[in-house]
């Protein structure tokens, strides 16, 4: 079983839509969780860390469900510029990061 | 803050030659740096974890004698692809995790290696 699993998509949504991605992780001892965004042929950029209490940054909301071992990312009022691949990253306490394969989002006019 | 640079951004070399890629954390110290490889339309694959002042830890299947990693200081790690072959052509990305930070990683812009 993979450490981190994501639905590869693509998710094709119209501008203004709300879209949500989930990511499941297998190690219950995982400590830190992140969402990264990667544009085509570019490096991943940190979008947001995911805290136990959930956190929000503008149109983006991240949540952690430890009982079910998944994290989620909600994007409200999608923009064309949100089109990218979203990577879920999980870290256990030994400086080991596990990447999901990414979920591709296409926001269409 | 949290800027990571990589050099060169793009390199073309002949089969059999060696290529060195530098990764620098510009505004923070990084005890740990990571080297990844990404083939087209695939996800990042961790190659090795580099700790300042000690030997790198390589992932299974990654040849340590082919991919030489040196983490000489808290702001610099280098990856040398030795005796490069066309199948080594890929996008190589480094990342750095701030010392004492909350484990987030910051990525360099990547180096696109083409071996002819």
Image: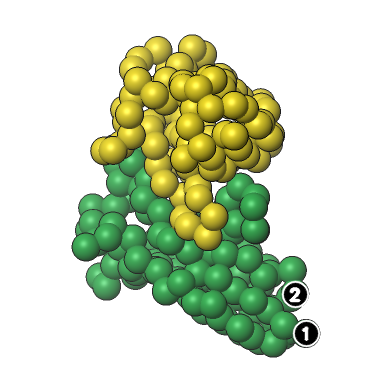
Chain colours: A green, B yellow
Indicate the chain on which mark 1 is placed.
A
Asked whether the beta carbons under mark 2 and mark 1 sit within 8 Å of each other, the answer is yes
Q: Residues within 10 Å of mark 1 (few under 14, many from 20)?
A: few
Front-most of residues B73 and B87? B87
- Label annotation for residue A80: 2
Residue B106 in view: no
- Left or right: where B59 falls relative to B109: left
- On screen, A75 above or below B56? below
- Looking at the image, residue B33 lies above or below residue A45: above
The answer to whether any part of residue B70 appears in the image is yes
Count of numbered badges drawn on the protein: 2
Q: Which residue is mark 1?
A: A109
**Would residue B12 be found to the left or right of residue B61 on screen?**
right
Percent across and percent down for residue B7 are 66, 27
Q: Nearer the viewer, residue B17 or B46?
A: B17
Query: In the image, what residue occupies the spot 64% across and 85% down?
Result: A13
Q: In the image, residue A19 lies at what x, y percent?
A: 57, 81
Q: Secondary structure at mark 2?
A: helix
Task: Describe the element under mark 1 as helix, strand or loop.
Answer: loop
Question: Which quadrant: the C terminus of chain A?
Answer: bottom right
Residue lying at 75% horizontally and 74% vertically, measured from the top left = A80
């Amino acid at each position: 079983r993979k450490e981190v699993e994501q639905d590869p998509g693509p998710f094709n949504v119209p501008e203004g839509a709300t879209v949500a991605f989930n990511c499941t992780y297998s190690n219950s001892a995982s400590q830190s969780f992140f969402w990264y965004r990667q544009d085509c042929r570019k490096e991943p950029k940190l979008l947001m860390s995911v805290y136990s209490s959930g956190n929000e940054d503008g149109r983006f909301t991240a949540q952690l469900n430890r009982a079910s071992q998944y994290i989620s990312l909600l994007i409200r009022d999608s923009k064309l510029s949100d089109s990218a691949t979203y990577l879920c990253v999980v870290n256990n306490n030994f400086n080991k990061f596990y990447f999901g394969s990414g979920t591709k989002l296409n926001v269409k006019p | 803050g949290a800027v990571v640079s990589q050099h060169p951004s793009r390199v073309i070399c002949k089969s059999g030659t060696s290529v060195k890629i530098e990764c620098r954390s510009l505004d923070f110290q990084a005890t740990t740096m990571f080297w990844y490889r990404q083939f087209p339309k695939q996800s990042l694959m961790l190659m090795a974890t580099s700790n300042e002042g000690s030997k790198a830890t390589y992932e299974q299947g990654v040849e340590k004698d082919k991919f030489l990693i040196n983490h000489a200081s808290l702001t610099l790690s280098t990856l040398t692809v030795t005796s490069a072959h066309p199948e080594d052509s890929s996008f190589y990305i480094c990342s750095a995790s701030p010392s004492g930070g909350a484990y987030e990683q910051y990525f360099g812009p990547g180096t696109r290696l083409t071996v002819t």
